[in-house]
Image (cartoon, rainbow, N blue to C red):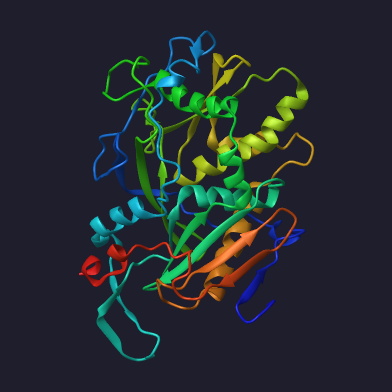
Amino acid sequence: MAGPHMYKFRTYPGNQFNKAFPFFRIPEEYGYFSQDCDRQFRSDKSQLRFYVPPANMNRVKYDLTHGYSNLIRKDENKKEYLDDLLKWVVENKMKFQIVPRQTQDSNEDIHPQITSLNTDFVCWRGLLTRLLCTPYENRDGWIIAVTLFRGTYYLCEFETEEKRHERETTTERQDQMCYGGWKFEQYLTTNVEGGSPDTSVPVNNNEGFCSVVRTRLNKHSLVFGGEVDCVDLAHGSKNKYVELKTSRRIDHPRQRENFHRYKLIKWWAQSFLIGIEKIVCGFRDDDGIVHSLEEFATQGIPDMVKGIRNPWNAAVCFNFLDMFLDFLKETVTTDDPRVVYVCRWQPKEDVSCEKMAPNSEFVFLPDRFTQEEAWG
């Protein structure tokens, strides 16, 4: 411990994470919700897209720059925190088997009016993806705020100073690359089952469909939401969601090695967490034209990287996450939505965790969620 309200989680050099893969229960979808064209929460499947594969995966011509000037943009300055996920939690609280919990001021009496979600952690899938990739991340740090409320730990990622600067100085070329990912989805999906893709309408990145899943990592129960790109009704599995990605065409062995080391770990973590079995990648040229597609089986990705130099290890990723959640349970002890513990990490450093004063700038649980009416 570095001070009265500062704690450390040892992450470097990280040998302690190199052990057998921990228990991780197959994620089960708990629910879903949509975000409409105005970024408004909708408790339905209205934004679910359907996968439409091309006739020939090796002969396509998708222009990822088409319609760029007509992009309908989400307001990136608006802080969303966990708001939509928490709206879903409130609407579906009966699914959690909400139970009375013991208060801190009594070891014997149970107060029936004080209830708790029957889960340990609630967050976005993207935050867990970032944590899984941390043991192999050498560029980007992170800030994660943690609040303990009614016995459940809520985790929310905050923007680092470096990420804010990167966002504010984004070049048009970089912006077009982001747009290309959304445009690629338009070429391969339709909003009507059995329909055909329509690439003439403007891309609107306010829209999204989110799956909410429940799972367990060793002794930690987790509920988290994650945006999914589309569903493949022809896929012969319970989880029919498909993740769509783009990447630059691979021309040289060094590019392939970098693709396996830096991209596949993030793709695997993102899809594995939510149970997605299939990833479809469009390989583009430098002009933003996709000429071929390739499918990746999520479960098989960790084996694909074993032949590269300094490969990443899926077990290390999940052991890191497991031990970090242990650390949070040991460290975050004040059950109060006004009190936030802020964890910061930079590559080749340990995680520092600071207990902030009440009502700091990092408070992220909205009053409409913490007030008694939401729990009645």
Q: Residue at x 37, y 38 (%)?
A: 238
Vertical side of 197 occupied by 243: above or below: below
Q: Nearer the viewer, residue 353 or 263?
A: 353
Quarter where residue 111 is shown: bottom left
Q: Residue furthest right?
A: 309
How far across and how far down the image is residue 288, in percent?
56, 17
Q: Nearer the viewer, residue 42 or 257?
A: 42
Vertical side of 191 occupied by 374: above or below: below
Q: How many marks?
A: 0
Q: Is residue 267 left or right of residue 110?
A: right
Q: Residue at x 79, y 37 (%)?
A: 309
How far across and how far down the image is residue 32, in percent?
31, 45
Task: Please indicate, yes or no, whether residue 291 appears anywhere in the rendered image.
Answer: no
Quarter where residue 247 is shown: top right
How far across and how far down the image is residue 13, in percent?
77, 58
Task: Please indicate, yes or no, whether residue 341 appears anywhere in the rendered image.
Answer: yes
How far across and how far down the image is residue 255, in percent?
73, 25
Q: Quadrant of the C terminus?
A: bottom left
Vertical side of 98 occupied by 122: above or below: above
Q: Is residue 221 left or right of residue 268?
A: left
Q: Nearer the viewer, residue 232 or 211?
A: 211
Q: Residue at x 37, y 16 (%)?
A: 199
Q: Residue at x 35, y 83 (%)?
A: 102
Vertical side of 214 occupied by 102: above or below: below
Q: Nearer the viewer, residue 140 or 108?
A: 140
Quarter where residue 324 is shown: bottom right
Q: Quadrant of the N terminus?
A: bottom right
